[in-house]
Image (cartoon, grey):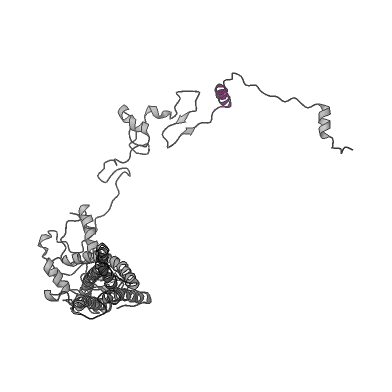
Amino acid sequence: MPSGFLGQLVVNFVLLLICFIAYSSQIFIIWPWYGRVLSVELVTLLLPFNIFVGLLLWNYFLSVYTDPGRVPDNWKPDTNADGYEVKRLTGNPRYCRMCERPKPPRTHHCRQCGRCVLRMDHHCPWINNCVGHHNHGHFIRFLFFVDVSCSYHLAMVWRRLYISLGNRYWARRSLTPFFYVLTQLQDEPDGTEMIFMILNMVACIPVLLCVGIFSLYHFNAIRNNTTTIERWEKDKVATMVRRGRIQEIKFPYNIGTRRNIESVLGKNHWLWCWPTKTPGSGLKYEITSNDENSDGESWPPHHDTIEGESSHKEFSLPDSPWTFENGTVNPTLQPSNSARRRAKNNGASTLPPYHPDYQPDASDSDDYDEDDTSRVRIRRGSEGYEVRPGNREDMLNRYLSEIGEKRYHYYVPEPASGSESEGEQAPLVKSG
């Protein structure tokens, strides 16, 4: 049931958008185009469109105000029958800690609604309600009629625009002035009509694109009898199977395309587009045979189960922190220094110094390069260069060699004379 001011505001916005697209096009575009006169052609054009819009609004109303399904107070799972789901870790029947009651199959807790929802697909903000067992069919029909109505609407408006532009083109090419004037008076849209054609295009095209993509997703979901949450779980299962953590498990609720659709829209195919009640109570669902699952895994699978091992296996650390569980050395532990990586061909140890199996080499006693005594000694094996501070005389000799001098002339200032020192100490006298 819709609740909250923001949710009701969104629902009213959706209703206004539907009514604007549906009725502004008929009042300000199609009605003036047919000369504001009721005719058989006008009724033939607008009657199917209004039927689609009426079914759209009806299914939207049912999607908003139909309870998606709640768990009965005294419901308990029948552990002796097939089709009940268990918890991933303990293997016991699923239990909701928020509602403090058992959860039927395919039931999930909705934080927005504050309760568990039967066969929960997702919480839709556009209907301010959860899409669950009892309103899933209404929601699918609502999406279908949005696609049909928007497509019909665009076809009408585009036909009006196309005929107007086509008549203008042929009227300008005609040599008869009377035909040009008659076309301008009958088929040329006025300013108001042109404004509403632009507004309807701008409002309808994004709705058709967004809802159309969303509809394809949900049509494929009901074809496979899968909800949005269950598709996320199937993706997780596929990832665990790919990593070898569990065996491949068949989704138990996919009972065939025809029966999958009938479980949501009803068994009568002629009433799939008509608002009908979803079959079943939402507490138990038909499942496929488990003969194909040789390991006897149930859905949802245990995420912590590894193929051939128990999910409660005791974890133990390896003997060395630099090795894998099977005792092999981690191949990614390679020395960062290029000289050490090249030392592999010279018989030196290729392991990093912090590895317990590292064997020091005699060449490692001095890490500094002394090829040229006149240069600064640089230590290798780091991310940069470490410059050792040199002697003052060595620095002076390098400087003299750079400027081309052999000797350095020291400048020694002479001591100041007595008169000069007295003059400097004498106060200044203002000259007359």
| Observer able to see residue 267 | no
Whether 384 is drawn above or below 165: the answer is above
Residue at figure coordinates x 45%, y 29% from the top left? 368
| Residue 279, image x, y percentages | 16, 76
Q: Nearer the viewer, residue 122 or 16?
A: 16
Which image quadrant: the C terminus?
A: top right
| Residue 249, image x, y percentages | 16, 59
Residue at figure coordinates x 13%, y 66% from the top left? 257
Q: Residue extending furthest bottom?
A: 38
| Residue 57, image x, y percentages | 25, 77
Quarter-wise, where is residue 290 in the image? bottom left
Which image quadrant: the N terminus?
A: bottom left
Quarter-wise, where is residue 218 in the image? bottom left
Prevailing SS of the magenta stretch: helix
Residue at figure coordinates x 24%, y 44% from the top left? 326
- Asked whether residue 380 is drawn in magenta, I would say no
| Observer able to see residue 61 | yes
Q: Nearer the viewer, residue 64 or 188?
A: 188
| Residue 303, image x, y percentages | 24, 59
Residue at figure coordinates x 32%, y 42% from the top left? 322
Identify the magenta region: 389-403
- Asked whether residue 395 is drawn in magenta, I would say yes
Whether 192 is drawn above or below 344: the answer is below
